[in-house]
Image (cartoon, rainbow, N blue to C red):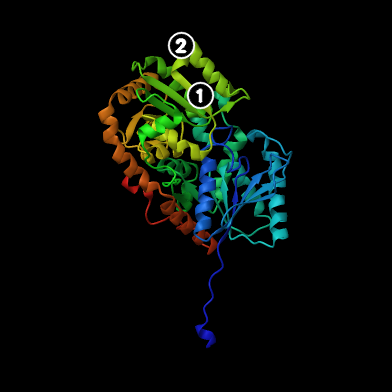
């Protein structure tokens, strides 16, 4: 055969994905386990299905955990020994990052791997990617998921993120080769930090598993959960974190007059007797003080595959957050055909069509939130009219669409480009 006619298949793209402070396999709703965990896991698995090889590096917090765990075709979870094999608070992890980076380097040498690029999630992971530049010549992309300067602008002083985080994020915006923003608002915030960095910021929202989160029968879901079909249920799903605005929702409950209104909370910890503990216990105590405890059910943290039944059985899903870079819970709910009542903040203002797929209210406005919940729980016909539009809106956020855009960024980086990284079409364009 003529050598000029020989063709060789390009080797698969190999990506080092970093999620320092939380494992993508952590139970949802627990401390530091939420939408980012879902995003990292589902993105990696979808990339693996498309032929990309992905190693996800996370800090080992359990001494009995295996160093390497196969998650799916082409996807491995690598537990990094950096610091004690125990839970360490996010604010205490920065000093462990050099050891984390060193372990990644040694792992690559031992495995004989060269990564084409690094994809870091959250600022701590971004700093590890920055440190790796001393050893690897690999470009890195980062998705912050949340930004300290925005969180601090909506949080009381005693809950502010550290100056170290805010300063580190400012540096990372400048040194990263590409930045993935989860919403147009986050994109704009990044440009405020570094106007000259606009060329490397690409708006690509997280995806949703539309096979897992799909419309299922309302009454069957209620029967499975043991809920009374006459009740009108408002569902909250998320971490027990002040940024999630759970205090606003709890304080709104006394103003909801529908006698059949019930409130289900997914997230937080239960003790061995299935009683709420830790920060979740404080939320329960608040409902007791307000005299609404008998209208509330606290489920604790659940695996992701348990959520669809709750979404389908609920009448509305409430997302009262002070800040959401995207609002994954809202899109999961809409994919299940359930309308959403949410704060008009961050990505929520772009994913929810006010009056069409749900209702948007001013963040922190207790009376407005109570009125919206009361009205939509009572308006059976209005919720039914939102049903089809919810499903249609959520369909734009399929993982296949998201991964196509992420891979575009990856290939541009791997091929040596550091500019003009953005995709030609953005999922938010129709919103």
Q: Quadrant of the C terminus?
A: top left
Q: Nearer the viewer, residue 261 or 169?
A: 261
Q: Which mark is residue 298?
A: 1
- Disc 2, SS: loop
What is the quadrant of residue 310 in the picture? top left
| Residue 326 spot, x, y in % from top left | 44, 40
Q: Residue at x 33, y 21 (%)?
A: 374
> Disc 2 marks which residue?
291
Q: Position of residue 319 (x, y in %)?
A: 42, 30
Q: Is residue 225 left or right of residue 176?
A: left
> Left or right of 70: which side holds 252?
left
**305 lies left or right of 65:** left
| Residue pictured at 49% horizontal, 59% vertical | 50
- Left or right: 29 with respect to 21? left
Whether label 1 touches label 2, CB < 8 Å: no
Q: Nearer the viewer, residue 342 or 253?
A: 253
Q: Quadrant of residue 360?
A: top left
Q: Earlier in the sequence, mark 1 or mark 2?
A: 2
Which residue is found at the position 54% from the left and 75% from the top? 8
Give the foreground label among 1 and 2: 1
> Where 408 falls versus 159 (above or below)?
below
Where residue 188 appears, as percent x and y from the top left, is: 43, 42
Q: Position of residue 100 (x, y in %)?
A: 69, 47
- Residue 345 visible in the snapshot: no
Callout 1: helix, strand or loop?
Answer: strand
């Amino acid at each position: 055969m003529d050598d000029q006619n020989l063709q060789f298949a390009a080797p698969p793209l190999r990506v080092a994905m970093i999620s320092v402070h939380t494992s993508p396999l952590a139970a949802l709703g627990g401390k530091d386990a939420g939408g980012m965990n879902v995003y990292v896991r589902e993105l990696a698995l979808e990339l693996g299905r498309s032929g990309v090889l992905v190693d996800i590096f996370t800090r080992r917090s359990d001494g009995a955990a295996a160093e390497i765990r196969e998650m799916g075709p082409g996807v491995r979870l690598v537990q990094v020994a950096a610091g004690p094999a125990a839970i360490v608070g996010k604010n205490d992890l920065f000093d462990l990052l050099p050891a984390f980076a060193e372990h990644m380097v040694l792992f690559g040498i031992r495995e004989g791997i060269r990564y084409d690029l690094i994809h870091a999630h959250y600022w701590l992971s971004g700093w590890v990617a920055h440190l790796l530049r001393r050893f690897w010549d690999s470009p890195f992309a980062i998705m912050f998921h949340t930004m300290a300067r925005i969180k601090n602008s909506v949080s009381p002083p005693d809950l502010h993120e550290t100056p170290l985080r805010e300063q580190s994020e400012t540096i990372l915006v400048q040194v990263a080769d590409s930045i993935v923003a989860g919403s147009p608002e986050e994109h704009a915030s990044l440009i405020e930090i570094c106007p000259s960095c606009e060329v490397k910021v690409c708006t690509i929202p997280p995806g949703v598993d539309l096979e897992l989160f799909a419309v299922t029968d309302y009454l069957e879901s209620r029967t499975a959960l043991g809920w009374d079909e006459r009740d009108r249920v408002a569902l909250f799903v998320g971490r027990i974190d002040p940024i999630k605005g759970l205090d606003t929702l709890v304080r709104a409950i006394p103003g909801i007059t529908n006698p059949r209104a019930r409130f289900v909370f997914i997230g937080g910890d239960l003790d061995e007797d299935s009683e709420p503990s830790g920060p979740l216990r404080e939320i329960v105590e608040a409902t007791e003080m307000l005299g609404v405890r008998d209208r509330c059910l606290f489920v604790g943290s659940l695996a992701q595959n348990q959520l669809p039944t709750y979404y389908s059985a609920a009448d509305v899903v409430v997302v009262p957050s002070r800040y959401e870079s995207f609002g994954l819970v809202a899109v999961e709910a809409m994919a299940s055909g359930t309308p959403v009542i949410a704060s008009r903040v961050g990505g929520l203002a772009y994913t929810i069509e006010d009056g069409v797929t749900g209702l948007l209210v001013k963040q922190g406005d207790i009376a407005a939130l109570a009125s919206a919940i009361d009205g939509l729980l009572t308006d059976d016909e209005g919720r039914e009219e939102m049903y089809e539009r919810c499903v249609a809106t959520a369909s734009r956020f399929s993982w296949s669409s998201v991964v196509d855009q992420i891979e575009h960024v990856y290939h541009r980086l791997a091929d040596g480009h550091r500019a003009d990284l953005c995709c030609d079409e953005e999922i938010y364009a129709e919103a």
